[in-house]
């Protein structure tokens, strides 16, 4: 089962490597990982997308919590939440037909064409994992995909619930 | 008035002195020469020069296990640090507090593959509780204070501080400021158990018919042996210890039913398998205890008390988890027992004890003696006799370790010191040295074997230099006994690389280092030799005991079986 774990931790050298090291050392999976500073520069926020059963998830949460740098850990998938990922994709747009199709599909998915080369369109799309994967698949039916970069998932709980240092 | 300023090296030693550090175990090298210079110019902290950095970590570890005080290791960058890795991992697995001062090349050189540069923080990351890359002279005393605090609190463990040379040199100075009242916002280990859980636990305990109190190293680390004994007596329950937990209750106590697990007593493993409630205190259901997890104590309700939430329900699911310091939680359980009107005279477990006493009659630690060959078990019994059961006993890893755990009843906590989690051969001798440094007037004996002792034998030199007269008793069976035992039992007797064909003359070896060497090869001479060895108080004695090479450690759990599926003897099942 896919899970999204949010981690609030000290923004210190080595903190990220401890998290990543822990996952590989204990044979936990990482599907994607996002990390950046928060509004408070001494704190970082990590979102890890992983999969495993309840027992594995319990161990992941406890083990991450045990790291000295970690302030809080939350399993976003256990309650109502929002998740987003950003996709940048370069596709071949050699002729009118391909250009029209790429534009049409991008509009349907509410993405943006953000750069155009002689034969290339670069498209930006945000959405959850499902939407991004569907978009890539559909584009690949219409034209050749040159390059794909996905940011990995970030997530936040819905409503009042917030992950804060105190 | 100007504030006095010090180099990082001086600040470091001042900080250690303020934290009451008596000894640093270490080895010098280029990146830490400023620290060695600072050590030279003061008298508060002593340094013990080992012969290999791995031994420094084990010495610090042994010192800590015997005293409860944080051990300190100092090593130079590169190979000095990597040599510490095994010792750090050993301490980590057994939750031993340790601070490793790891020299590093100057900050400007880091990352450039400089001479004797390794990323020690990266290398040690999976085996430390925490680590610091210290980058500022002024911050150094506070980093040291934090490292000690982290090492010793919560679930203890090793902490590495990386010290680049440029923050140690004399031209880089700062005032000495250390805040001993450490607070870390991201680190707040639980102390007390949750009161609802305590209530649930006591409800379960008072209703139990077949309770077993199963305790581990947590009792030793928390200095909770007296409290444990009082609780066990109050409940009049059977108590078993893990290999790490021996001494948590006296090995001579009527309620003690022996060690459990792979080479535990029949009564301990039987009791576990038949228990209806297991009260686990500071133990972690290690695979050497549980045997096949799926078959482990199927009918027992498990109350698991541990300071580390990750230990709870990691392998065996706990019905009543309690996170807290084990000494505090025992106190809470005791109060709650009062609250529900529990009386010690209830004789709740009379029928249960009758059953256990039947299992005791299996006499699972009996063995046959011979008129010609010394049995390894006899050696341990002789050591027990001639130290009045009061010695600090360290061991290496293998058959001798199990024999020591089985045949030397430990009366007190911290008396038995071994590498239970990592199983580090080469641990015992330097660990014994660390103990002897702390307790020069006590008997300190390293029970070892001809394989293990050669893994840190160079420390005979250190013992002469600092006059550390430990007794080494080597159960010499001319082979790697435990490997050989498995090869006998599982690999059709094919002794692949378990035979030591070229052993040194250990008497001459001990003598070459300036110590006393003895050899015993006949049962009739054993007692006399052991007595003599312990009578020599001012010199290290190496007793090389030639024992029966065909002896196996029994009882032994059967592979993939339940906790009480055991071989009692060769070919005899329990």
Image: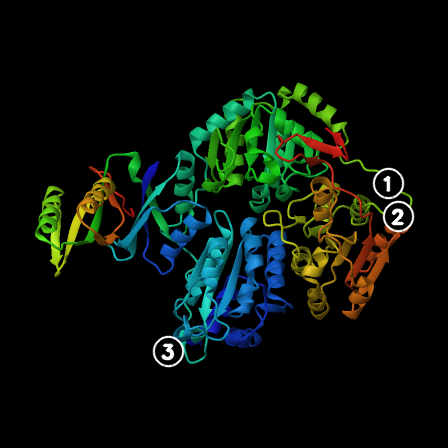
Residue A123 position, x and y percent, is 15, 52
Q: Chain of mark 2?
A: B
Q: How is the image coloured?
A: rainbow
Residue B502: image quadrant is bottom right
The residue beneath circle 1 is B369
In the picture, the disc for residue B113 is none
Which residue is located at x 29 percent, y 39 percent? A76
**Dot 1 crowding, Cα within 10 Å, few <14, some 14–19, many 20+:** few
Q: Is residue B304 left or right of residue B416?
A: left
**Which residue shows up at 42% across the image and 44% down it?**
A28
Are circles 3 and 2 on residues that touch, CB within 8 Å? no
> Circle 2 — which element?
helix
Q: Position of residue B117 (x, y in %)?
A: 48, 71
Q: Disc number at residue B523? A: 2
| Discs 3 and 1 share one subunit | yes
Foreground label between 3 and 2: 2
Q: Secondary structure at mark 3?
A: loop
Q: Nearer the viewer, residue B92 or B178?
A: B92
Q: Nearer the viewer, residue B520 or B32?
A: B520
Res B25 visible: yes
In three-dimensional space, the C-alpha distance between marks 3 and 1, rounded to whole angstroms, equals: 76 Å
- Secondary structure beneath dot 1 equals loop
Judge by depth and name the residue closer to the eye, A148 or B512: A148
């Amino acid at each position: 089962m896919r899970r999204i774990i949010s981690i609030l931790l000290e923004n210190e050298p080595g903190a990220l490597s401890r998290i990543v090291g822990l996952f590989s050392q204990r044979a936990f999976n990482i599907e994607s990982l996002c990390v950046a500073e928060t509004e408070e520069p001494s704190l970082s926020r990590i979102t890890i997308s992983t999969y495993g059963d309840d027992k594995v998830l319990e161990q992941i949460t406890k083990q991450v919590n045990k790291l000295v740098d970690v302030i809080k850990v939350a399993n976003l998938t256990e309650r109502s939440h929002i998740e987003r990922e950003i996709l940048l994709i370069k596709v071949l747009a050699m002729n009118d037909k391909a250009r029209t199709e790429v534009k049409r599909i991008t509009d349907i998915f509410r993405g943006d064409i953000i750069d155009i080369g002689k034969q290339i369109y670069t498209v930006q799309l945000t959405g959850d994992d499902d939407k991004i994967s569907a978009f890539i698949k559909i584009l690949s039916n219409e034209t050749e995909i040159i390059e794909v970069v996905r940011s990995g998932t970030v997530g936040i709980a819905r409503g009042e619930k917030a992950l804060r240092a105190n | 008035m100007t504030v006095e300023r010090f180099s990082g090296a001086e600040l470091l030693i001042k900080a250690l002195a303020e934290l009451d550090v008596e000894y640093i175990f270490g080895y010098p090298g280029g990146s830490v020469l400023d620290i060695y210079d600072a050590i030279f110019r003061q008298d508060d902290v002593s340094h013990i020069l080992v012969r290999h950095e791995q031994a420094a970590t084990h010495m610090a570890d042994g010192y800590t296990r015997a005293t409860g005080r944080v051990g300190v290791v100092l090593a130079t960058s590169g190979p000095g640090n990597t040599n510490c890795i095994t010792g750090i991992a050993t301490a980590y697995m057994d939750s031993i507090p340790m601070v490793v001062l790891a020299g590093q090349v100057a900050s400007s050189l880091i990352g450039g593959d400089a001479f004797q540069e390794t990323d020690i923080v990266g290398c040690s990351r999976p085996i430390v509780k925490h680590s610091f890359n210290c980058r500022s002279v002024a911050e150094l005393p506070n980093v040291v204070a934090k490292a000690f605090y982290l090492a010793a609190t919560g679930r203890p463990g090793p902490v590495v501080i990386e010290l680049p040379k440029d923050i140690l040199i004399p031209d880089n100075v700062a005032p000495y400021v250390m805040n001993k009242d450490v607070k870390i916002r991201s680190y707040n280990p639980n102390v007390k158990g949750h009161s609802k859980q305590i209530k649930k636990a006591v409800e379960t305990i008072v209703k139990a018919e077949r309770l077993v109190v199963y305790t581990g190293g947590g009792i030793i680390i928390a200095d909770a042996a007296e409290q444990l004994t009082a609780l066990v007596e109050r409940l009049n329950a059977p108590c078993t210890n893990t290999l790490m937990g021996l001494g948590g209750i006296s090995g001579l106590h009527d309620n003690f039913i022996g060690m459990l697990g792979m080479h535990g007593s029949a009564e301990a493993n039987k009791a576990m398998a038949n228990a209806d409630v297991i009260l686990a205190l500071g133990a972690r259901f290690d695979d050497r205890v549980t045997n096949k997890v799926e078959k482990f104590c199927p009918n027992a309700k498990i109350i698991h008390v541990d300071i580390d939430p990750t230990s709870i329900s990691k392998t065996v699911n706990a019905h009543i988890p309690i996170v807290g310091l084990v000494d505090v939680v025992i106190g809470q359980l005791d109060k709650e027992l009062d609250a529900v009107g529990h009386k010690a005279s209830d004789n709740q477990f009379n029928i249960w004890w009758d059953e256990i006493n039947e299992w005791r009659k299996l006499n699972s630690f009996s063995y046959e003696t011979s008129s010609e060959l010394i049995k390894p078990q006899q050696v341990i019994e002789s050591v027990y006799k001639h130290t009045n059961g009061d010695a600090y006993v360290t061991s290496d890893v293998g058959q001798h370790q199990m024999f020591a755990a089985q045949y030397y009843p430990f009366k007190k906590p911290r008396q038995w010191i071994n590498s239970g989690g990592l199983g580090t051969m080469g641990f015992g001798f330097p660990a014994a040295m660390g103990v002897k440094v702390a307790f020069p007037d006590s008997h300190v004996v390293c029970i070892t074997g001809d394989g293990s002792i050669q893994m840190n034998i160079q420390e005979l030199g250190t013992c002469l230099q600092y006059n550390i007269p430990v007794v080494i008793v080597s159960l010499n069976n001319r082979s790697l006994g435990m490997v050989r035992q498995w090869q006998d039992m599982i690999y059709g007797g094919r002794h692949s690389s378990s035979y030591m064909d070229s052993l040194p003359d250990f008497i001459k070896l001990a003598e070459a280092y300036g110590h006393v060497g003895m050899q015993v090869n006949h049962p009739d001479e054993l007692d006399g030799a052991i007595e003599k060895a312990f009578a020599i108080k001012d010199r290290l004695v190496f007793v090389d005991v030639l024992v029966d090479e065909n002896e196996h450690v029994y009882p032994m759990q059967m592979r993939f079986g339940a906790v009480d599926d055991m071989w009692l003897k060769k070919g005899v099942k329990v």
